[in-house]
Image: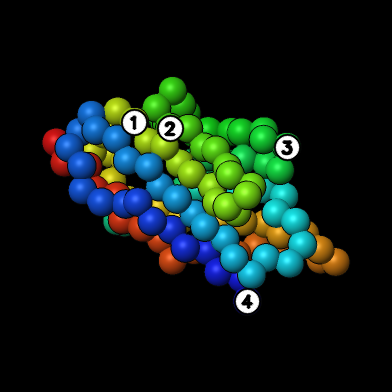
Amino acid sequence: QVQLVESGGGLVQAGGSLRLSCAASGIRGSISVTRWYRQAPGKQRELVASITNEDNTTYDDSVKGRFTISRDNAKNTVYLQMNILKPEDTAVYYCNVVVRRFTTNTYWGQGTQVTVSS
């Protein structure tokens, strides 16, 4: 059974930093891409950053230059380093992986809350 466990969220002041982790287990097949999404209250879930199995990365314009996505294959973990946090970064952050074996399946983590105070 695939499990994605996110951690690292919390309360931080504006200008501060947090590092989110997404640890995957039970994966059968290969992870082709891992994405971080976020959802603020009353808003739609939005894509924040992604990283492929070839380490190609993408970022939403709102986080470029402040957030960095990376992965540790040995630990089956993807990180989201978030610097210069702003109150508008407040949201629940979700990890999402796309796994390919015989078919393609997508899995979600339970989410971790990030709150940035002004």
Q: Which residue is mark 2?
A: 67
Secondary structure of the residue carrying numbered label 2? strand
Q: Earlier in the sequence, mark 2 or mark 4?
A: 4
Q: How many residues crowd mark 1 within 10 Å: few (<14), some (14–19), many (20+)?
A: some
Q: How many residues crowd mark 3 within 10 Å: few (<14), some (14–19), many (20+)?
A: few
The kind of residue tagged 4 is: Gln
Evaluate if marks 2 and 3 touch, with contact meaning CB atoms under 8 Å apart: no
On residue 54, the disc is: 3
- Residue in the picture at 24% in, 33% down: 16
Q: Earlier in the sequence, mark 2 or mark 3?
A: 3
Expressed as whole percent of the image width and height from the top left, the position of residue 41 reads: 29, 56
Q: Earlier in the sequence, mark 1 or mark 4?
A: 4
The kind of residue tagged 1 is: Asn
Evaluate if marks 2 and 4 touch, with contact meaning CB atoms under 8 Å apart: no
Q: Which residue is mark 1?
A: 83
- On screen, residue 72 versus residue 60, left or right, reads right
- Residue in the picture at 44% in, 66% down: 110
Q: How many residues crowd mark 2 within 10 Å: few (<14), some (14–19), many (20+)?
A: many
The kind of residue tagged 2 is: Phe
Q: Is residue 60 above or below residue 75?
A: above
Q: Is residue 93 above or below residue 86?
A: below
Q: Earlier in the sequence, mark 4 or mark 3?
A: 4
Evaluate if marks 4 and 3 touch, with contact meaning CB atoms under 8 Å apart: no
Please state which of residues 75 and 99 is positioned toward the viewer in this rendering.
75
- On screen, residue 82 versus residue 74, left or right, reads left
For this orientation, the residue located farthest to the top is 65
